[in-house]
Image (tube, rainbow, N blue to C red):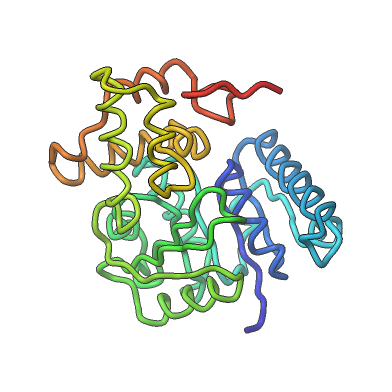
Amino acid sequence: MRKGTVTVVGAGTMGNGIVEVFAVAGYFVKLFDVNEEAREHGIHAILLRLQKQFERGKLDAKPQEIMCRIQGISTLAQSEGSALVVEAALERLDVKQDIFRSLDNIHSPTTILATNTSSMSVTEIASVTSHPERVIGMHFFNPAPRMPLVEIVRSRMSSDDAISTAMGLANDVGKVPIQVRDTPGFIVNRVARPFYNEALRLVGDRVATVEQVDRIMRSAGFKMGPFELQDMIGLDINFAATRSTYESFFGEPRFRPHPIQRTMVNSGMLGRKTGRGYYRYDE
């Protein structure tokens, strides 16, 4: 497959992780973020990860060779000519729809526009574009460079060509793509909500501590407990996914968020990225 240009919108943890995935696989990648500082921080974070991998002998190319394939851009218009654009912005429908309106005006109908949303309706996001058939979901998991699974989401309007191309791209960068329908939470987040929610209820009802729940789940065969995993993903991201799934199912009780999540997020304790979540992460 000829490696075209990929643009990623959003320089946060997920966005810069997706940039790294494509750059390591040989693609030229543009990274856009409205915040210049966030954009620069995202590119620097990629460099640090690549250097660590190189030191451990896990990279064939030198970090600087890969970094030469990454370009920060300050306007969405600079993404013109990309074969694929992956949006990895805030989990807010209005924000995503604004981005896709802009992308729809910039790119030719042959460019695939993908959203990395974890639980929002791809059909609703695509509805604001004039070519909804080229809009799909391409949901990577955090941390994107390490997690193999990618959900390729077919909206009610996605074309077969867009889906098959996305499946091929995911395979080309070494991921394991699975094709899913545009349902609330798709597969993974729909299954994962009870994993987090039941753990939160146990802790909220003082049946067990955070540490006890994580230890028991690890002993049952899980690589990480639900609270360790939330800290790694980011409590804000996890809470947003829970709320979105709950609202999409019209208040289905088994998907209901827990007050502990809201308290943690509103207090700025978001996990590893802020140094404190359910656990503390000192320098």
Q: Is residue 74 above or below residue 125?
A: above
Question: Which x, y percent locates residue 71?
Answer: 74, 55
Which residue is drawn at the image coordinates 31% and 42% (left, top)?
Answer: 195
Quadrant of the snapshot with the C terminus = top right
Q: Tell me where residue 91 sits by quadrant.
A: top left
Quadrant of the snapshot with the N terminus = bottom right
* Residue nearest the observer in this picture, 207 or 252: 207
Q: Tell me where residue 200 sits by quadrant.
A: top left
Question: Which x, y percent locates residue 36?
Answer: 68, 37
Question: Which x, y percent locates residue 153?
Answer: 36, 65
Question: Which x, y percent locates residue 174?
Answer: 59, 70
Which residue is drawn at the image coordinates 46% and 50% (left, top)?
Answer: 99
| Extreme residue toward the front, this view | 219
* Residue nearest the observer in this picture, 218 or 166: 218
Q: Tell me where residue 77 sits by quadrant.
A: bottom right
Total marks in image: 0
Which residue is drawn at the image coordinates 35% and 25% (left, top)?
Answer: 261
* Residue nearest the observer in this picture, 247 or 54: 54
Which residue is drawn at the image coordinates 31% and 58% (left, top)?
Answer: 187
From the viewer's perspective, tell me whether residue 72 is left or right of residue 91: right
Q: Is residue 223 above or below residue 231?
A: below
* Residue nearest the observer in this picture, 136 or 266: 266
From the viewer's perspective, tell me whether residue 215 is left or right of residue 171: left
